Image (cartoon, rainbow, N blue to C red):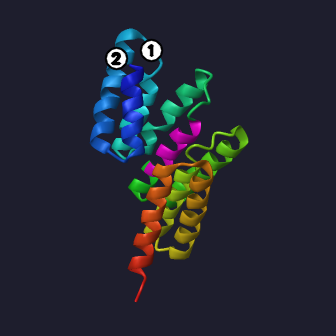
Amino acid sequence: VYVCNQAATVAWTHGDVEATARYSRETVELSERYGLFFAPIGALHLAWCDGNPDGIMPSIEMLLAFGTQTGTTAFHLELADAYRMRGAYDDALSAIGRALGFAHANNEMYYAADLLRLRGDTHQERGETSAAVEAYEAGLQLARERGSVLFASRLTARLEQLRAAHEP
């Protein structure tokens, strides 16, 4: 079950909806069969695949009720992304703010650069180019400081695309 859950998380980190859904369904099925606590994480990933923020919060609440806060930053990243996919940009930005606050307060900084990437994506979709650039640059700096090659390359690509789209 753990391997399926990790595979779903890696697929989600890369934005692969199909693989995330496949591994998450297997995570939920095996967790329910063997009575393990990974089912809410699988359900959370599946809700993200569907762009359904309403399906994510119950999983977050269940995980917190289990007594775990590990991964809360990533779970709120998924929640914010689901809001963004739905076009609920204010809710997405609010969720990003809460997740960044949690990340800083609990030193759970792994996904902080990706949260800033998502903040940039949200601003870009709203047509707020300068806010998008500011978020991408802050995320890129943080990714480089933390040695996160995946998030740094993703943020670099976003900045290059944005600049290319706005060059004369």
Read off the magenta span.
72-81
In percent of the image, x 57 and y 58: which residue is there? 139
* Tag 2 residue: 30
The amino acid marked with disc number 1 is: Leu
Main secondary structure type of the part rendered in magenta: helix
Residue 11 at x, y percent in the picture = 36, 40
Image quadrant containing the C terminus:
bottom left
Which one is nearer the viewer's eye here, 51 or 13? 13
The alpha-carbon separation of the residues under discs 2 and 1 comes to 8 Å
Q: Residue furthest bottom?
A: 168
Tell me: residue 72, above or below residue 148.
Answer: above
In the image, is residue 11 part of the stretch drawn in magenta? Answer: no
- Residue 87 is situated, as x and y percent measured from the top left of the image, at 42, 59
Is residue 88 among the parts visible in the rendering?
A: no
Callout 2 crowding tier (Cα within 10 Å): few <14, some 14–19, many ≥20 = some
Q: Residue furthest right?
A: 105
Circles 2 and 1 in contact, beta carbons < 8 Å: yes
Q: Nearer the viewer, residue 161 or 35?
A: 161
Compared with 163, 4 (above or below) is: above
- Residue type at mark 2: give it: Leu
Left/right placement of residue 107 relative to residue 147 reads: right
Report helix, strand or loop for mark 1: loop
Find disc 1 in the rendering and name its residue.
36
133 or 32, nearer to the observer: 133
Q: Residue at x 43, y 67 (%)?
A: 125
